[in-house]
Image (cartoon, rainbow, N blue to C red):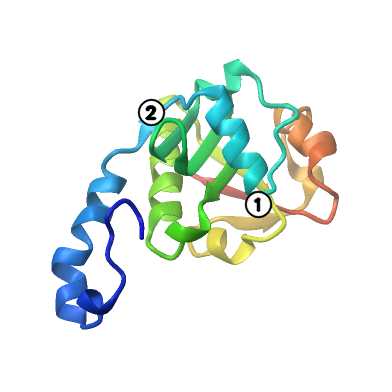
Amino acid sequence: MLDGLRVGAACENRQTRRSSCLRPLMHELSMIRARPSRSAAVAFLEGEGLPVTDLIDEHLEQFFFVGSEDAPSGLVGLEIFGTDALLRSLAVAASARSQGLGTALVKHAEDHASAQGVRTIYLLTMTAQTFFERRGYRRAERIQAPPSIQSTREFASLCPASAAFMSKQL
């Protein structure tokens, strides 16, 4: 269940699933909010196995979440450097996956970045290369990263060299 999203017998046929069963999810997606609390973001990201040692309050200014303030069900962040940005910390709770929440969070982050003058978003991923490829991101060589991205702790030390480095032009 995702905040009232019924996934049982009432949602078995496509007609029902499209109408009443997706309304709670669509409501959830429309509730993407900025700046989660530090404690909630750290707890959620640690629970999803993502790095948090470099997470500072300044980063949280560009983070977005869905779900309750004390227990997000999805989260994404940006580090913005002029016309470049690092998309980081995308995570969706296991109980909320495959419902479009990750896509909505990425789109929201992209829209926010674009409004801030960002032209290219970069990211590193160990597990979600296919997810990001379906959303227009392309694999690149790490050496192609601009200096601002290379200087982030996520790029420089937290994500291993085997992580896929990807970018997308906005």
**Is 141 on the left-hand or right-hand side of 3?**
right
Q: In this orientation, which residue lies closer to the viewer: 124 or 76?
A: 76
Residue at 73% from the left image edge and 40% from the top image edge: 145
The answer to whether the residue labelled 1 contacts the one labelled 2, judged by CB atoms less than 8 Å apart, is no
**Is 162 on the left-hand or right-hand side of 45?**
right
Residue 43 coordinates in the image, percent (x, y): 61, 35
Residue 29 coordinates in the image, percent (x, y): 30, 47
Q: How many marks?
A: 2
Tag of residue 115 = 2
User: Which residue is farthest top?
Assistant: 58
Instruction: Give the quadrant of residue 128.
Output: bottom right
Above or below 126: residue 80 = above
Label 2 crowd bin: few (<14), some (14–19), many (20+), radius 10 Å = few
One can see residue 48 in this view: yes
The answer to which of marks 1 and 2 sits earlier in the sequence is: 2
The residues tagged by marks 1 and 2 sit, at their Cα atoms, a distance apart of 21 Å
Residue 1 coordinates in the image, percent (x, y): 36, 60
Which amino acid type is shown beneath numbered disc 2? Answer: Ala
Q: In this orientation, which residue lies closer to the viewer: 69 or 107?
A: 69
